[in-house]
Amino acid sequence: MIMVVLVVVTGAGLAWFAWLSRWWLNSDGAGYLATGRNLVRGHGLRAPDGEPLSWWYRPLYPIWLTVPWVVRESFTASIWMSRLALVAAAPVAAAATWRFVGRPGPALAAGLAAVAHPLTLLAGGANFVPDGMVATALAIAAVAATLAADGPRLRRGWLTVAVIAVAAAAATKETGILGVPMVAALLWAGRRRPARAAIVAMWGLLAVGVFVALLAVAGPLVVPVRAVPGRLRRGLEFQVTTSGPLRLVGVVLLVALVVWATRHAGEALPRTALALVAIGLPQAVYATGAGLGLRNAATVPLGTALIVGAWAGTDGQGRWWARTVGTLVAAGVVVWGVAASATHPSRLGDVSIRSWDNPATRRTAQWLRAHTGGRPVGCTLIFCGALWLFGDDDLDLRLLPQSAAPAGPTRLEDLRFTLRSGWRGSRRASPVCGGPMLVLTKSDERFGTVFECDLLREVRTRRLRHVVVTEGPSGNTYDAGRLIPYLERHPSFVRVYETGPEDWPRILAVYEVVGPPRPLERPRLVLAPPARYALRRGELPRPMITFDARCLYDVVRRAFSTPTDPRNARVSERAWEAAPSAGCTRR
């Protein structure tokens, strides 16, 4: 009977993602796929610029994504590889429930609850992110640790499975290392058999420890603690479900499940489920306060799925109403997951607008392949990975020196730019020579800028032939579309290619380096509105201008409507200077 249940929940998971079929190529995913392609083509586990990746730096996810590329390169095959890691969570939850409850109904409910949660779309079902794969590995580790401690003697076979699963989680994403204290706590609870209160206290301490560790390693929150609940509500709206009533029902169900599990913490399955919740909830709180995504809390749905199985399988000491309530709760969680996923933002919206797999990107890559002559091309972090994929190894891409500072300060002089763009995300580094800032953006957890001295130094030392700047609909810190006015004004950069209005709101522009770049006299600082609003104290430099999206696109439309001949560069500058006042604030 268990095999029938496993086949059913696995088939349901595959059908689920076939129904929720929309997906997009995000910037993180482009980096993962580019790294995996290097491995498939025999170049080793290297970033697109040829730098080798250390074995501990999350190599498993790009390897997993590009396994099908040994036969044929396909983004669709890769998104299904990402989804398979999420589909695997359903039979894991069902098998664990069967092992501890011994009934097919609760096992089926746990498996369906694991796959139906809308967070699975956010955690790798609709884009290329490793969080769902990490959550599945940690769920396997939690169940294996409980089975290892369940008996008169420690079962080494199950302990080995737990260790391998934690190692796989850590090799997929840094947060996978949280499996170490989780497994240790489960082994202690299983061997010592402490009182229920001690187990609940242990999970509380683990949750606090995870939160403190995130603060110490990843940095402080960027918003006041009092603002976290409001941001969490908005995060649920934009990342889980657009329906307000469904969000409320989801929170009530989560609280009810956790409360029930704490009352049964002495039992093996609720104890295992609480372990996953204990490391997932603090990640949700931290991610909310740090401007990150709720996908970091992907272990919470799997923990609640195990609670669903445990609650549905309880006999209530022979009381019929207890069994009925358990069955109704299990059915309610599954129905809620289906309804919430049906109103998931990626289900309702046009996800193609967020994807870098689009005609404009492919055309730009094709143009560069035909015109670079083997010379290096500078590009922005948010776009370089996708450009390298579509350039098919023919482009020598170099990241522009984009710097970032943690959010929190409200004065420009308090910003500390300690991060630089790297192929797999930002890395610790300070600006080389600094100089005046050309742009200042902000997206949730950090500010972003490009210093003129660093930019011109990169162009000279790398002997860049072209510079590609982009602006996407997300307004990410590492977009660089607001560099366009500076490049339009600079005599050493001539726009030779740009996308048309039919491709907007995504902007792509290529500038050729036609002479030794020298600093401009008093370059204008261009600010994104979030950065301007955040820096509400202190004096800002002059001259400067604040662009909202409307103003930016209007200016770009005017500039791009001029011919791309170098003799008309001043015409572009006049178009820029004639920007409308709506959405633009000058100083």
Image (cartoon, rainbow, N blue to C red):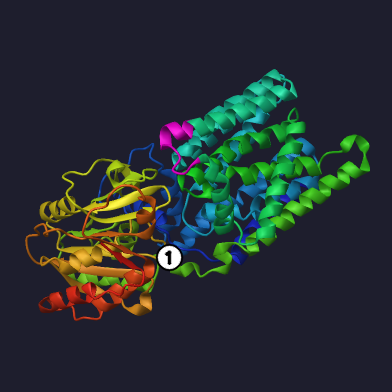
Q: Percent position (x, y) of residue 474?
A: 42, 61
Query: Is residue 223 within the magenta segment?
Result: yes
The answer to whether residue 187 is above or below residue 309 is above
| Mark 1 secondary-structure assignment | loop
What is the crowding at mark 1: few (fewer than 14 residues within 10 Å), some, or many (at least 20)? some
Q: Residue at x 45, y 47 (%)?
A: 61
Return the residue at label 1: 355
Q: Percent position (x, y) of residue 90?
A: 65, 49
Instruction: Pick the residue in front: 307 or 243.
Output: 243
The answer to whether residue 109 is above or below residue 579 is above
**Residue extending furthest right?**
319
Q: Residue at x 93, y 39 (%)?
A: 319
The reply to whether residue 386 is visible in this rendering is yes
Instruction: Pick the residue in front: 428 or 184.
Output: 428
Does residue 23 appear left or right of residue 9 in this picture?
left
Does residue 348 appear left or right of residue 217 in this picture?
right
Q: Percent position (x, y) of residue 551?
A: 34, 70
**Amino acid at circle 1:** Ser
Find the magenta span and give its range: 213-224
Q: Quadrant of residue 478?
A: bottom left
Q: Quadrant of residue 521?
A: bottom left
**Which quarter of the figure is the C terminus placed in?**
bottom left
Q: Residue at x 40, y 67 (%)?
A: 357
Instruction: Pick the residue in front: 544 or 153.
Output: 544
The reply to whether residue 361 is visible in this rendering is no
Q: Quadrant of residue 379?
A: bottom left
Q: Percent position (x, y) of residue 408?
A: 39, 43
**Residue extending furthest left?**
516
The count of marks equals: 1
Query: Is residue 221 within the magenta segment?
Result: yes
